[in-house]
Image (cartoon, rainbow, N blue to C red):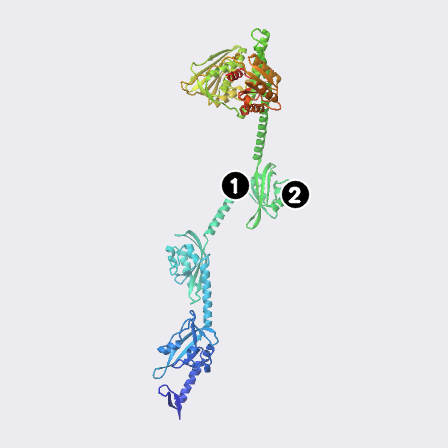
């Protein structure tokens, strides 16, 4: 029996085979069909024209085509593939296998689109089918769904990316992955930034070669070489090293064995933690704690630490034990009231509650009773704060006994200063009140002097007595004021170039009445040439007068006094000698002290307040000079004054001698203003006797009215007028155009520098102190009449 079968070898396409051959072919075909149907991959076969001839069940499931629907269809219609990345149609591997007759390998990134539009990733390959003659008779296409594999790979890759992302972004600690040869496979970004190295300088290099072999540390090498073979791990291996770019750092190293997720290789994960800042902070903390402990132990203030819940002492420094007279251990566990602070337990507990409410209490003066019974004033300050997350109370106790004593001393000094101030004010007021009656008395004496030689001898003697005693009273009043000026350092000088000879002449004239009264022999020696000083002539005259007066008071009647002035080098030297009682040796070093006098007796025969020599020393020193004293008891005394001279040109004008007081050649209109009627009237009479016209006014308003009407050449005005004082009267007079040429002279019991300055500011031209020195007044009158 013969069977006709399709055969590509003949032109008709058919050939004749025997029955056994046909059965053998059928079995072979069936065996191939069953085999292809049972394998796990999808299989599609085509003929030479690329038309589908067979789909196994897997191919049918993946493409969505059945055998009947797909048979005879072009392969591109059943097997539709695109590139996964570009989404463009991919070349069919079967077409290439037909065209080239070669096996086409697995394609990558290929997506199969099923009949229903479902896409899935596949791996595919194709191979040509050849007949007995070796010609290509068709193609077999094999592909598989790799979706699950893709998901697995993606999960693995995601995990790897996640891990690498963590490694790359971690800042602490730094991570380095090493292979079995200790070669760096990967380092995170923090490693590169911390050690200032690039990725190229790090990866694929041996760890010991990094950074000029800065990691080549013997101890580290030993540990790393034991990690893989013995599965050892090490923790917190501390390395302190000088790195070229970042300096000395302290690192903690941790290492363990890990397996690579892709190929299972054994790797070393090395974690590096930079603990330099931590170590430095720990060192600072340790140093701070040491300093605190030293301060705590050596502080000269008492320090107590209390339990914030119970108020009991937990620590006390040595000074606290010393202050309280307790042994250190005796203070622990006690409350404040038990160690002598606060009056009783109730007061202590009240302060403790207040501290817990406010967090701070302070007592500027808190009494403390020590264990030995001593009472101490302390300053107590307490704070509540957190230490190691626990509340702590700290008490600072300062012994303020010395400060309290100093405060008391300051208070006493202030009280003393206030007392001195009130004393000065009293002395100034007393001198003013004393000068007011002295002024009219002295004026009356001057009037009596104008009676001439024909006066009654008894009256002349009485007048001389009054004149001497008024002079003595005036000197005492001046000394009262000098006490105030010396103790408050308010002496002010007005310097000018002066010839000392004229100063000596005036001083001798001022001291003459006392010298004549005691019948002393006075010898004055002056150089023929001027001796120039830059000085206050008034104050230097006071120096000479005080020295002459002192000599006269301590020299017996009929004794000798000498005054000599000479120039020695660059100094003017004034010597005042006397034949008096001398100065005792124990008194000599203190002779210039304020109120210092020789032994006093009940008769007070020498008089004075013990101020004159103090004034002498003060004034001489203010002139850049010095004063010395030489004396022996019973052999008299010598005072030597030395003051630097000044060099003046030869053309320096000589001072004109002051003319003796006499009747003025020209009469002046003078207005005398004083609320003391005797002073005003006596001054007016004295001016009239001297040849001047004079009117009086006893108040400020009366003075203004009289001045406008009388238009005086000169006004002698008291300052202490009732209602409107002399300052205000002067200011108003200066506002009158008709009185612009009038000279204003202040006549007052106040003679301090501040008083003189105030009178100038009010508009006065001169300032005279009661009782008025007639020579000074006559000089002002002479100046006005010019």
Task: Locate residue 349, reporting x and y percent.
Answer: 64, 44
Position of the N terminus, as image quadrant, is bottom left
Farthest residue, direction left: 133
Q: Position of residue 441 (x, y in %)?
A: 59, 15
Q: How many marks?
A: 2
Q: Which residue is mark 2?
A: 346
Q: Residue at x 42, y 66 (%)?
A: 265
Say if 596 sits above or below 372 in the image: above
Which label number is shown at residue 499? none
Q: Residue at x 46, y 63 (%)?
A: 163
Q: Earlier in the sequence, mark 1 or mark 2?
A: 1
Report helix, strand or loop for mark 1: helix
Does residue 583 appear in the picture of this structure?
no
Where does the image place residue 151, in percent across and percent down from the top left?
Answer: 47, 70
Which marked residue is nearer to the observer: mark 1 or mark 2? 2
* On screen, residue 184 above or below 659: below
**Who is closer to the viewer here, 675 or 83?**
675
**Where, by quadrant of the figure, is residue 137 drawn?**
bottom left
Expressed as whole percent of the image width and height from the top left, the position of residue 777 reads: 54, 16
User: For mark 1, what is the residue?
Assistant: 298
For mark 1, does the 10 Å Cα neighbourhood hold few (<14), some (14 to 19), or many (20 or more) residues? few
Asked if labels 2 and 1 touch by Cβ distance under 8 angstroms, the answer is no
CA distance for labels 1 and 2: 32 Å
Depicted 358 relative to depicted 576: above or below: below
Which residue is outermost to the right?
A: 346
């Amino acid at each position: 029996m013969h069977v006709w079968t399709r055969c590509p070898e003949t032109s008709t396409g058919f050939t004749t085979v025997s029955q056994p051959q046909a059965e053998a072919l059928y079995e072979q075909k069936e065996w191939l069909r069953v085999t292809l149907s049972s394998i796990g991959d999808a299989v599609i076969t085509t003929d030479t024209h690329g038309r589908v001839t067979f789909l196994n069940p897997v191919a049918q499931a993946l493409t969505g085509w059945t055998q009947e629907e797909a048979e005879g269809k072009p392969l591109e219609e059943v097997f539709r593939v695109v590139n996964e990345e570009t989404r463009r149609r991919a070349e069919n591997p079967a077409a290439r296998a037909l065209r080239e007759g070669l096996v086409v390998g697995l394609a990558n990134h290929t997506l199969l689109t099923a009949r229903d539009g479902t896409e899935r990733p596949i791996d595919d390959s194709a191979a040509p089918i050849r007949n007995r003659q070796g010609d290509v008779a068709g193609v077999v296409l094999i592909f598989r769904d790799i979706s699950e594999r893709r998901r697995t790979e993606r999960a693995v890759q995601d995990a790897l990316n996640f891990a690498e992302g963590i490694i790359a972004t971690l800042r602490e600690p730094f991570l380095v992955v090493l292979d079995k040869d200790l070669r760096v496979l990967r380092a995170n970004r923090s490693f590169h930034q911390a050690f200032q190295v690039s990725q190229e300088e790090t990866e694929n290099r041996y760890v010991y070669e990094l950074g000029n072999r800065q990691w080549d540390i013997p101890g580290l090498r030993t540990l790393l070489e034991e990690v893989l073979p013995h599965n050892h791990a090490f923790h917190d291996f501390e390395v302190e090293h000088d790195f070229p770019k970042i300096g000395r750092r302290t690192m903690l190293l941790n290492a363990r064995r890990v397996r690579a997720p892709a190929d299972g290789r054994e790797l070393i994960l090395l974690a590096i933690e930079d603990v330099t800042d931590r170590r430095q902070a720990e060192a600072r903390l340790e140093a701070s704690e040491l300093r605190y402990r030293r301060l705590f132990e050596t502080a000269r203030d008492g320090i107590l630490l209390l339990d914030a819940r119970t108020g009991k002492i937990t620590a006390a420094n040595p000074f606290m034990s010393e202050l309280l007279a307790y042994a250190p251990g005796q203070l622990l566990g006690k409350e404040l009231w038990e160690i002598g602070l606060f009056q009783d337990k109730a007061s202590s507990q009240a302060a403790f509650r207040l501290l817990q409410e406010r967090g701070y209490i302070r007592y500027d003066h808190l009494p403390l009773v020590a264990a030995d019974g001593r009472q101490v004033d302390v300053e107590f300050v307490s704070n509540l704060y957190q230490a190691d997350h626990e509340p702590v109370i700290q008490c600072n106790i300062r012994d303020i006994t010395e400060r309290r004593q100093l405060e008391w001393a300051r208070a006493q000094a202030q009280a003393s200063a206030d007392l001195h101030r009130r004393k000065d004010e009293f002395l100034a007021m007393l001198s003013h009140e004393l000068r007011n009656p002295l002024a009219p008395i002295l004026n009356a004496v001057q009037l009596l002097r104008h009676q001439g030689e024909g006066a009654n001898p008894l009256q002349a003697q009485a007048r001389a007595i009054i004149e001497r005693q008024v002079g003595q009273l005036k000197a005492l009043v001046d000394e009262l004021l000098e006490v105030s000026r010396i103790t408050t350092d308010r002496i002010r000088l007005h310097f000018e170039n002066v010839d000392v000879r004229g100063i000596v002449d005036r001083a001798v004239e001022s001291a003459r009445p006392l010298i004549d009264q005691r019948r002393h022999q006075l010898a004055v020696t002056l150089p023929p040439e001027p001796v120039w000083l830059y000085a206050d002539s008034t104050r230097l005259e006071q120096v000479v007068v005080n020295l002459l007066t002192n000599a006269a008071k301590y020299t017996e009647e009929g004794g000798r006094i000498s005054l000599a002035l000479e120039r020695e080098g660059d100094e003017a030297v004034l010597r005042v000698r006397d034949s008096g009682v001398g100065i005792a040796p124990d008194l000599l070093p203190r002779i210039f002290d304020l109120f210092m006098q020789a032994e006093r007796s009940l008769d007070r025969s020498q008089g004075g307040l013990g101020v004159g020599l103090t004034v002498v020393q003060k004034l001489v020193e203010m002139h850049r000079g010095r004063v010395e004293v030489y004396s022996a008891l019973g052999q008299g005394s010598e005072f030597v004054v030395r003051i630097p001279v000044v060099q003046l040109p030869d053309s320096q004008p000589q001072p004109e001698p002051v003319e003796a007081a006499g009747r003025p050649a020209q009469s002046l209109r003078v207005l005398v203003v004083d609320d003391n009627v005797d002073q005003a009237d006596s001054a007016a009479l004295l001016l009239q006797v001297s040849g001047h016209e004079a009117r009086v006014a006893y108040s400020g308003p009366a003075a203004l009215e009289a001045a406008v009407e009388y238009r005086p050449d000169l006004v002698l005005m008291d300052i202490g007028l009732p209602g409107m004082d002399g300052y205000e009267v002067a200011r108003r007079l200066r506002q009158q155009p008709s009185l612009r040429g009038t000279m204003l002279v202040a006549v007052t019991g106040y003679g301090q520098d501040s008083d003189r300055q105030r009178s100038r500011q009010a508009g006065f031209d001169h300032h005279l102190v009661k009782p008025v020195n007639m020579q000074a007044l006559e000089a002002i009158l002479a100046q006005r009449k010019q």
